Image (cartoon, rainbow, N blue to C red):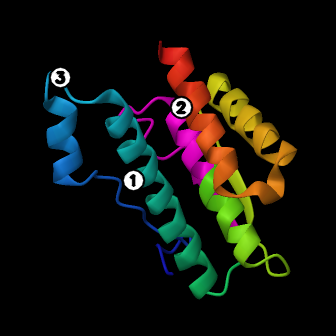
């Protein structure tokens, strides 16, 4: 994917959430669990699409920022789950053709959150969705 003269191989990720999700976020009594799951699913899909675009373009390395933590302002814990989930799923689908991912964190707390999520996934690496169910439950317990 051509970006510009300074970066001949780049990609652009549009991070505007779906309108239905934005509307749910604005409701005063929105069901928090469903909203959080919707946000994580949205950010996971965003990262899946990015990984697919990188893979389809023939690249096997990706450097990216912590998408959605800036202008959208999502908590890093949600974004970390989504990033690790998308990378984990991609690796399980392509174990012999993996993509090396580097995440540029502009805040130390972002790096710590990503490392913590990565370490949690390593514990039950081949358990698939079970890993993310336990991470979401832990996130819910933290909010309570």
Quick check: can you spot residue 9? no
Separation of marks 1 and 3 at Cα, in angstroms: 21 Å
Q: Residue 76 bears which disc, if any?
A: 2
Return the disc, 2 or 3, that comes first in the chain's sequence.
3
Is the residue marked by circle 1 packed among few (<14), some (14-19), or many (20+) residues within 10 Å? some
Secondary structure at badge 1 equals helix
Secondary structure at badge 3 equals loop
Q: Going by the image, does 88 lie left or right of 31? A: right
Return the disc, 2 or 1, that comes first in the chain's sequence.
1
Q: Nearer the viewer, mark 2 or mark 3?
A: 3
- Residue lying at the far top in this picture: please name it: 144
Residue 97 percent coordinates (x, y): 80, 81
Name the residue carrying label 3. Answer: 29
Q: Reply yes or no: does residue 72 show up in magenta.
A: yes
Q: Which residues make up the magenta segment?
A: 60-83
Q: Nearer the viewer, mark 1 or mark 3?
A: 3
Q: Kindly indicate the quadrant of the structure image that contains residue 136.
A: top right
Name the residue carrying label 1. Answer: 42
Residue 13 percent coordinates (x, y): 42, 62
Q: Residue at x 60, y 50 (%)?
A: 83
The front one of 76 and 5 is 76
The front one of 93 and 51 is 93
Q: Residue 142 bears which disc, if any?
A: none
Q: Residue at x 67, y 60 (%)?
A: 87
The front one of 18 and 69 is 18
Separation of marks 2 and 3 at Cα, in angstroms: 23 Å
């Amino acid at each position: 994917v051509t970006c510009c003269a300074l970066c001949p191989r780049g990609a652009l990720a549009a991070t505007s959430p779906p309108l239905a999700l934005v509307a749910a976020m604005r409701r005063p009594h929105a069901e928090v669990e469903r909203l959080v799951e919707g946000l994580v699913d949205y950010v996971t899909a965003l990262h899946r699409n990015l990984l697919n675009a990188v893979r389809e373009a023939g690249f096997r390395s990706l450097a990216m920022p912590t998408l959605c933590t800036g202008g959208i302002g999502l908590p890093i814990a949600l974004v970390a789950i989504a990033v690790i989930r998308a990378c984990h799923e991609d690796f399980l689908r392509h174990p012999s053709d993996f993509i090396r991912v580097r995440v540029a964190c502009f805040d130390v707390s972002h790096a710590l959150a990503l490392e913590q999520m990565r370490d949690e996934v390593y514990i039950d690496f081949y358990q698939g969705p079970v890993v993310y169910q336990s991470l979401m439950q832990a996130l819910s317990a933290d909010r309570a």
